[in-house]
Image (tube, rainbow, N blue to C red):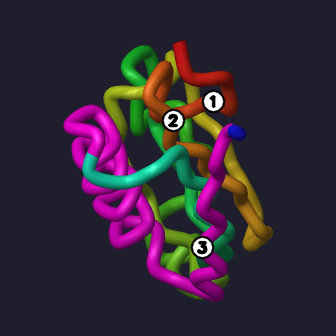
């Protein structure tokens, strides 16, 4: 039987969620934890992928701060993404730290 651990983390800061994802991914790669699903919510953020440029953001920093939106540069994706505050499931499996899949 395949085992999946589900972690209900509630609301966490975006950077903390990324760190948790990396920690779980590293632990999973070493077979220290089972396949895991991290359920969490984070405050509004604007993520800049590898191909995104800050100059393409129409709102200035003060406008974003006033609305509680932080900007994060990431090595994931190519463009800007504006995920609102929402529940975000993150799966950490032995096959891929960002997708749900069966153990191979």
Cα–Cα span, label 2 and label 3: 13 Å
- In the image, residue 37 sits, relative to residue 54, either above or below, namely below
Nearer to us in this view, 67 or 101: 101
Residue 21 appears at what percent x and percent y?
40, 53
Asked if residue 9 is among those painted magenta in the image, a careful observer would answer yes
Q: Could you say which disc has been placed on residue 7 in the image? A: 3
Are circles 2 and 3 on residues that touch, CB within 8 Å?
no
**Residue named by callout 2:** 93
- In the image, residue 59 sits, relative to residue 10, either above or below, namely above
Residue 10 appears at what percent x and percent y?
64, 87
**Residue named by callout 1:** 99
Quadrant placement of the N terminus: top right
Residue at 20% across, 37% down: 30
Q: Secondary structure at mark 1?
A: loop
Q: Quadrant of residue 51?
A: top left
Question: Which residues fall within the magenta stretch?
Answer: 2-31
Asked if residue 37 is among those painted magenta in the image, a careful observer would answer no
Query: Which badge, 2 or 1, comes first in the chain's sequence?
Result: 2
Q: Secondary structure at mark 3?
A: strand
Query: Which badge, 2 or 3, comes first in the chain's sequence?
Result: 3
Q: Could you say which disc has been placed on residue 79 in the image? A: none
Are circles 2 and 1 on residues that touch, CB within 8 Å?
yes
């Amino acid at each position: 039987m395949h085992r999946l651990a589900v972690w209900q983390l509630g609301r966490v800061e975006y950077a903390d969620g990324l760190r948790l994802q990396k920690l779980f991914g590293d632990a999973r790669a070493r077979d220290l934890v089972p396949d895991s699903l991290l359920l969490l919510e984070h405050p509004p953020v604007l993520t800049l992928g590898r191909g995104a440029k800050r100059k393409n953001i129409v709102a200035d920093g003060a406008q974003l701060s006033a609305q509680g939106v932080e900007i994060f540069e990431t090595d994931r994706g190519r463009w800007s993404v504006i995920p609102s505050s929402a529940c975000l499931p993150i799966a950490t499996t032995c096959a891929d730290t960002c997708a749900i899949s069966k153990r191979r």
